Image: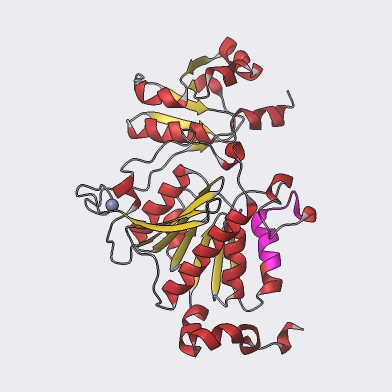
Amino acid sequence: MTTSITLNELYQRQITLLGEAAFEKIRNSRILIIGAGGLGCPALQYLSSSGVGVIGIVDFDIVSASNLQRQILFEINDIGRKKVEAAAEKLKKLAPFCNIQVFPFRLDATNSLEIFSTFDVILDCTDNFYTKFLIHDACFKTGKVLIQASVYQYEGQVQMFDFRERQGPCLRCLWPEEPLDGCTATCAEAGVMGPLLGVMGSIQAMEALKLITEKEHLNNGETLFVDLMSREFDVRRFKQKSDCPCCVKHECKVQEVLQVDWPVDLKEFVLVDVRSLEESDQCPLVEQFKKHYRVLQIPLDKIKDFVPPSDQKYLTICARGLRSLNACHYLRAQGLEVYSLRGGTNNILSMENL
Ligand SMILES: [Zn+2]
């Protein structure tokens, strides 16, 4: 069926508006989308159906029931499947001329530079500070264009960082050191509306297409704020920081944070539980750990007051592995040997069926 459909039939409306030469630029473009979630799904749909030549999808996660409210590429039958596989299957039906490449693993400091090197534009559709800064720094290092979005309840923001000339301002002009996840509520904790993600993911796709076809688009130092409750769109500007560690001093490293999977030999480590005291008290697992191993209780918001001896090996833990990753990242920057337990105590409880 698809063999009888021509490119012109599929893309006529767009070619009418942009012209053949601009469409050719879209056909020749290579876009990487990190996170096939609420932002990634609409971005993937619109970019593949716009005729983008190559689309890469990075996501390690599987589809769960709570995703379906906003991750519109997936349906009930996809629950339990890898997101990249379910997404690629749908997109191939929607856009048979698009070459879809999947990366079904977690993006980290060891693989980001290599993956980014074969794409022109990177869309950050992730939901945590650690990964956002990793993507930002890796884009700076590889000289890519980054289009980043984030959402909170009814509001969102989009920024574009064109690092082809390694110029600023950049994200580290605003945040020289990344904020710790857990200092702000995640979507899982604060809730988020599906249509907001549809709007923000679509804006990311639109900015990518305008960049590729050389139309007016967001620039370095501009943030588009969107508030769907008050129906306001607003672009605000920020300046380059004169001592920015990234775009001025070029000292920014793609930080390697090592995560370990359960089971772990806990005797090797001093455990650092970074959850709130109330949370830890409610978790019998930590009580068991305390009987047999060395456990320190340092809630994430107190981690900067923590000055531990450097001759020990530490393992940070929390409920889901996100706050512990941030604590790990922070403590590594202080020169300690630290690892973070992937998936947190929730993962251990599900595996051990305690
Ligand atoms: Zn900067």
Residue 169 position by quadrant:
bottom left
Q: Residue furthest front?
A: 230
Which quarter of the image is occupied by the N terminus? bottom right
Q: Can residue 109 be seen here?
A: no
Position of residue 276 in the picture relative to residue 94 (left or right): left
Q: Which residue shows up at 36% across the image and 19% down it?
A: 308
* Front-most of residues 120 and 47: 47
Q: Is residue 86 magenta?
A: yes
Quadrant for residue 239, please give it. bottom left
- For the rendered model, the colour scheme is secondary structure
In the image, the segment drawn in magenta is 78-90
- Asked if the stretch drawn in magenta spans residue 43, the answer is no
The residue lying furthest to the top in this view is: 291
* Residue 329, above or below 3: above
Report the side of 353 relative to 55 (left or right): right
Please, what is the dominant secondary structure of the magenta stretch?
Answer: helix
Q: Is residue 123 visible?
A: yes
Residue 159: image x %, image y %? 41, 57
Q: Quadrant of residue 342?
A: top right
**Residue 207, above or below 158:** below
Q: Residue 217: percent from the left, percent from the top?
A: 40, 69
